[in-house]
Amino acid sequence: MTDAPSAVTELLPDTGSKRRQIRPKAERRQQLIDATIRCIAQHGLSAVTMQMVTREAGLSVGIANLHFQSKDNLFRETLRCVAEEYHGGQIDIMEGNDIADLGDRLDALLDFQLGRGVTQRQKMSVWFAYYGEAGARPVYQKIVSTTDRLAAQKLEALFAKIIEQGGYEDVDARELATGYSALIDGLHLALLVTPRELSKRRARSVARDFLHRAFPQHIRR
Amino acid sequence: MTDAPSAVTELLPDTGSKRRQIRPKAERRQQLIDATIRCIAQHGLSAVTMQMVTREAGLSVGIANLHFQSKDNLFRETLRCVAEEYHGGQIDIMEGNDIADLGDRLDALLDFQLGRGVTQRQKMSVWFAYYGEAGARPVYQKIVSTTDRLAAQKLEALFAKIIEQGGYEDVDARELATGYSALIDGLHLALLVTPRELSKRRARSVARDFLHRAFPQHIRR
DNA sequence: ACCCAGAATGAATGAATGTTCATTCTTCAT
DNA sequence: ATGAAGAATGAACATTCATTCATTCTGGGT
């Protein structure tokens, strides 16, 4: 994210330097996606223009269409990027075996979901901006639901293992996984819309409470 | 859409009649707000135009600015309308004394929140379309949080009464109310974005499960 | 030193959209 | 019947935006 100007390219600190830089396609794409995320967070999806994005990226207007063909496509790819980062992070924690204890693994998941990385206003804004349009745009639904389903399955599997290990009665893994996912989404929403009413600290506490009530042996209050 | 050029203009009663109707201001305002809701649900907030809304309402383009001054204002009023309907409905149930038993009252609340009226795709779409922009638009945040806070207080009070009545230990009313609200929001979101994965029936079941685990004597499985 | 593939630019273009307002029409009190 | 108040209309206007493309520039290969 930090725009380190590639080592010691020039002696001048690049103040207003308009020297044209040629960079590989992949790098420019990421640069534009990052700028799009910042713009959506600051101005809202519906107010974002191509000029805004390219200026934010420090590039010219033409370049967005060069690398993404259209605004629509740029927005789709941005959503895909955010979705993969979020769901990918969850899946890594859930299926990685670097944390042996199941309770600890669940804790790590919660930390990821409500920790610094994900609950930055920027990322949350983007997330819900797209949800807001998803009702009318099947494309967005598809992008999200593809990765979403995989994460949901992993979560259900983790819950099932915990249920088995703890010998919990009257608890359905699928039902609980659905509830937990919804709870996390709802907390993200509250953090975004009414940050005054809910601190991140309390959000974590609320989520832990949910897990504690379901798996008292694994998650302590 | 079918532009029937009224072959028999005068003889038919009013099929495709373009007779100008004059109605009181309040009625037209509601008519435009309803049309706005339908448009947002169908096309997404960012794609809605004034022409779209006024055509949907069966009126001319100029009338929106006559009654709402600007598109921005029309959108604000639409949000206010939806927010008041949702939060008002909840508050009526929670503070009304027509349901004596607290468990039954909670049940009624759940039915309202996940029942026909609220979870219509139309209303949900509008709801989240605004949430999506809320991060960048303080005005929207304010409109929602005003009514939201009141509903949250009522819910907390209801939970507190139930906790007292049931003698539940280790349950904090505020914490639980926050969690329940977040859960409901999250379920709405899931119903909107991945309706294939979650039926309304299962959403209700998930929410009941949450309440059952907290208040086993009041809410049965 | 030279060249050229292709990365980058930004003025120009055309389409779409919010808003205005001169005009038309409806209603109702008189 | 008549007139006035104001509700409703929609063509016109100014603006904004996505997209294009002729041109410029860069860096690596020879």
Image (cartoon, coloured by chain):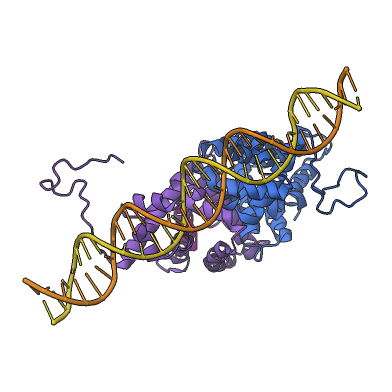
Chain colours: A blue, B purple, C yellow, D orange
Left or right, A32 with respect to C29, comes to right
Secondary structure mostly seen in the magenta stretch? helix
B109 is within the stretch colored magenta? yes
Q: Nearer the viewer, residue B98 or A120?
A: A120
The quadrant in which the C terminus of chain A is found is: bottom right
Whole-percent x, y for residue C24 in the image: 22, 60
Q: What residue is drawn where x is 74% and y is 44%?
A: A109
Left or right, A6 with respect to A162, comes to right
Q: For residue A178, what is the image quadrant?
A: top right
Left or right, B52 with respect to A44, comes to left
Q: For residue B182, what is the image quadrant?
A: bottom right
Q: What residue is drawn where x is 55% and y is 50%?
A: B207
Whole-percent x, y for residue B183 in the image: 58, 52
Left or right, B76 with respect to B54, comes to right
Whole-percent x, y for residue B125 in the image: 49, 49
Whole-percent x, y for residue A179 in the image: 60, 46
**Res. B39 in view:** yes
Q: How many marks?
A: 0
Above or below: residue D30 compared with residue B138: above
Q: Nearer the viewer, residue A117 or B112?
A: A117
Above or below: residue B159 compared with residue B184: below
B14 is within the stretch colored magenta? no
Q: Nearer the viewer, residue B39 or C30?
A: C30
Q: Nearer the viewer, residue B95 or D8?
A: D8
Q: For residue A199, what is the image quadrant?
A: bottom right
Q: Which residues are magenta?
A: B101-111
**Res. B215 in view:** no
